[in-house]
Image (cartoon, helix red, strand yellow):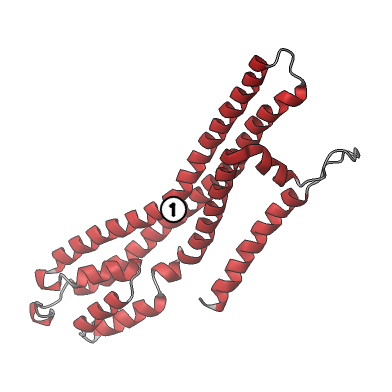
Amino acid sequence: MGSKKVIWLMLIVFVGLMAICPMLMAQDDDDDQDIPKESLFTRYVVAGGPIGAFIIVLMVAALALVIEHFVNINRNKLCPPEVIAELEALVDEGQYEEAITLCSANQNFFCNIIGAALSKMNDGYEAMIQAMEETGLEEANKLHQKISYLSLIGNTAPMIGLLGTVVGMINSFMVIKSVAAPSPKLLAGGITTALATTVLGLVAAIPALSFNFFFKNKVNRYILEIGMICGEFIDKFKQLPVENAPAEQ
């Protein structure tokens, strides 16, 4: 991993920690010494129980996905300028087999599309265009599937929080059923679980859905830009003589 990537990764982690620290360090203003001075975040986790813990796991997974997407979903990764320049030089020199080999050695969005098109040179320009379009659609679907996990977490977390809400309320009503005159303290456990899991679900969902929207727009933009670059590259073969095509394997 290059130095720039490390810097960006550290910056993302730092911003994430800065966002979480206020929750970790938050303290109640209550001066009553009988109330334990725990962090607000810890109270939510404890109150949420197993359901809340599962939502925390989803938060960690979402954070990992966001970091991974920031590192890997960028134009220089999907369409390296140095590889484009090398491919253009090989094609201009008529070294088509070497160009195909270079595409095979560099598995990225651009090279996968161009490699598929170059492999159809013997079948003509139209076959190359068809191979480029089919592979481009496949690569685009891979990118969309990659970022869809953020959407899955964003849509699932509130439902899990709602499950915790229902479970907490059921627990409170069971206390009411079993105790003739339950004190507020007996009811507080279930109600706290209900509200804590709801909050945790929303805290997990809102950033996940926001980043999913961000990366979806980013992916759509890159697909259009790289598609245009691929089209311009394949246009070099419009007038390609048949004898210049690589021999069938």
Residue at 36% across, 64% down: 226
> Along the horizontal axis of the image, is 170 left or right of 33?
left
> Along the horizontal axis of the image, is 106 left or right of 244?
right
Determine whether 1 is above or below 202 in the image: below
Q: Nearer the viewer, residue 108 or 1?
A: 1
Residue at 67% across, 37% down: 47
Crowd band around label 1 with a 10 angstrom C-alpha radius: few (<14), some (14–19), many (20+): many
Residue at 33% across, 62% down: 227
SS at mark 1 in the image: helix
Name which residue type carries label 1.
Ile
Q: Position of residue 67 (x, y in %)?
A: 54, 61
Quarter location, residue 98: bottom left
Q: Position of residue 241 (x, y in %)?
A: 11, 78
Quarter location, residue 86: bottom left
Q: How many marks?
A: 1
> Along the horizontal axis of the image, is 109 left or right of 41?
left
Determine whether 201 is above or below 98 in the image: above
Residue at 74% across, 44% down: 40
Quarter of the image with the C terminus is bottom left
Q: Nearer the viewer, residue 17 or 218?
A: 17
Q: Which residue is mark 1?
A: 147
Q: Position of residue 110 (x, y in %)?
A: 33, 68
Q: Nearer the viewer, residue 77 or 105?
A: 105
Q: Residue furthest bottom?
A: 93
Q: Residue furthest top?
A: 180
Determine whether 36 is above or below 62 in the image: above
Q: Position of residue 209 (x, y in %)?
A: 52, 45
